[in-house]
Amino acid sequence: MTPSDPAPVPSTPATGIRPPVAERRITVRSHHGDAVEDRYEWFRAKEDAAVIAHLEAENAYTQQRTAHLDGLRAQIFDEIKGRTLETDLSVPTRRGDWWYYGRTVEGKQYGIQCRAPLVSADDWTPPELSPDADVPGEQVLLDGNIEAEGHEFFSLGSFEVTTDGSLMLFGIDVAGDERYTVRVRDLRTGEQLPDEIPGTFAGATFSPDGRFIVYTTVDDAWRPDTVWLHELGTPVADDTQLFHEPDERFWVGAGFTRSDRYLVIGLGSSITSEEWLLDADDLRGEARVVWPRTEGVEYDSEHAVVDGEDVLFVLHNDGALDFELVRVAASDPSGERTVVIPHRPGERLLGVSTFRDWAVVGYRRSGLARLGLLDYRTGDVSEIAFDEPLYSVGTGSNPEWAPPLLRLGYGSFVTPGTVYDLDVATRELHLRKRQPVLGGYDPAEYAQERVWATAQDGARIPISLVWKRSFGDAGAAPRPTHLYGYGSYEHSIEPGFSVARLSELDRGVVFAVAHVRGGGEMGRQWYEDGKLLNKRNTFTDFVDSARHLVDSGFTTPSQLVAEGGSAGGLLMGAVANLAPELFAGILADVPFVDALTTILDPSLPLTVIEWDEWGDPLHNPDVYAYMKSYSPYENVRSDASYPRILAVTSLNDTRVLYVEPAKWVARLREVGADALLKCEMVAGHGGVSGRYNAWRERAFELAWLLDVLGLADA
């Protein structure tokens, strides 16, 4: 057999359907004296007709192999749809003289942005809106369904209205590559202004006076690197460059403080950050740095006025692993620091949001996110308490500088998404809305709890569980189990509600989350112990979590399916190689499974900035060897009996390129694995656009998962 011959892949025994067989075109990668032959790197040539043909053949094969699930997919889609109040409204948010809110309409893919006038200047209680009743004075600002007409993909990356309510900007992506064209509309006349800014990153914003738009653009590697100032009514070619960051490790963003006092230009790598301030009334003036960047020091600042003085509350980790909150003079940020909340090991400070009279602080303790109110006068923090043992909470949209109420978002595995307004003076929570779940959903029929696994090195790994009570207590007898994991970038998987998940739980599946190292659930050290040359802890923690569920009688390997996406997809590929015997199936969404090849190439999107997370294998032979030891594509085993695998990707994904799962599946097929690839041909990293399309996509994945668990007929 010559190197370019296709690998012999047998037909799948259960079906007799033969999978696509990719041509082998050998390329050689050589680093640190190590030469590696790659048979499928040619998939990277997106413009090659043979690549597109191969992806289309993979899609056709996947459709054939899953055709028997068409009915179940339709049933799950109908269940998601049937539980969702399709025509609904969000809770209005006050800004200026208006209440802003969103509408969804039955049969329409995208949301509709609306507003209605305040009754009076003292009107702080949001109106209770009903889908069946007209809203007095309602104005439709942007209908995503109209904007999406003629496009297979649609994403809204920027949306803002000026403080006085007269102008609106919106940024639209119709390809899935996260490059948005910003346009401006006069809300008084409905006229579209000639200002049009192509190729922006998400998050464009008006200046407080409405004269300017501040936006960012990306470099060839899709890294936001430059902040621009556009004056309305002038050519884009005349826009002013406010800031450019040449260091390829840093992302750049910009936004105005809630007080409208400053424009904050923030830049950060995985381990280092820096902020610059511009006076909002002099945006072409000279920016000044808050704290000069120091390698390994992260911080962010919020403006407030305390005792008549402009101050900055700065959250930082300079000598404080789990962060500390200090106050400095805005006129001299590098001067004296007053400690507001000292560093407390194991209690990770997450953020602070300042208002005129008080602030809200986010922090994480015992694996759960929490919120507390900060009194400027005393420095005391009063925690906002909730009853459930597992929950997630965060601040909602709070654009006003001096509100008497604080908007919160709350939920748990069993409690649907809930909007509260907290009366700051009385500490009373006002329930504004709880996500409706149609069909008679009763949270009391479901249970949630946390158990703990022990890692190989003795670390205790939290595992969150949710299940339907009618099938018995979790752990009383082995049950079909869906184990989810992520474990990178200090990102924490919160206990949140999912309508789609009910289709699993109601068929007897236990849903579990392994909060492995590399995430942020247990503090900054938990993250540090799962990155760089500690990355293997992420993978072994997940395996140890799965083994705990098996050994403790929660499930069996034949009843266990694992899932992860993006960096969690890397986790899936790694555990498939480490412990294939533990799982009946593995679902990998946009999986980062060819990590070493990607991180070796600084010309690829986002590579250089990722070196702080994974290490730099291009220049460091030890990092190269370590990554090569776990990168899933590099370590596909010929001696393993792999579980069933489904990899889902998107052709236009700029974060994890489609080539990674495509190569991985081809390599898995060489060793006889039953692996499927589903590639969305018009989508990005987040998958398809439109809520109905997203429901169909999730129904496809859940039908496959239930089939693996033997519950396709349940």
Image (spheres, grey):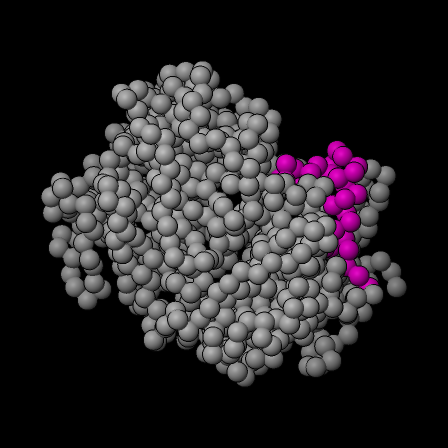
Give the left or right position of residue 598, taking residue 441 as reference: right
Which quadrant, please, contains the N terminus? bottom right
Vertical side of 260 occupied by 500: above or below: below
**Residue 464, quarter of picture:** bottom right
Give the left or right position of residue 129, taking residue 590 as reference: left
- Image coordinates of residue 326 in percent, x first then y, are 44, 26
Vertical side of 319 occupied by 80: above or below: below
Residue toward you, 116 or 364:
364
- Image coordinates of residue 179 in percent, x first then y, are 46, 44
Q: Predominant secondary structure in magenta?
A: helix
**Residue 602, quarter of picture:** top right
Residue ID at (57%, 80%): 711
Give the left or right position of residue 120, taking residue 236 as reference: left
- Residue farthest toward the bottom in the current orientation of the protein: 713
Residue toward you, 296 or 71:
296
Residue ID at (55%, 41%): 346
Residue ID at (81%, 59%): 4
Q: Which residues are magenta?
A: 610-638
Residue toward you, 692 or 620:
620
- Image coordinates of residue 327 in percent, x first then y, are 41, 24
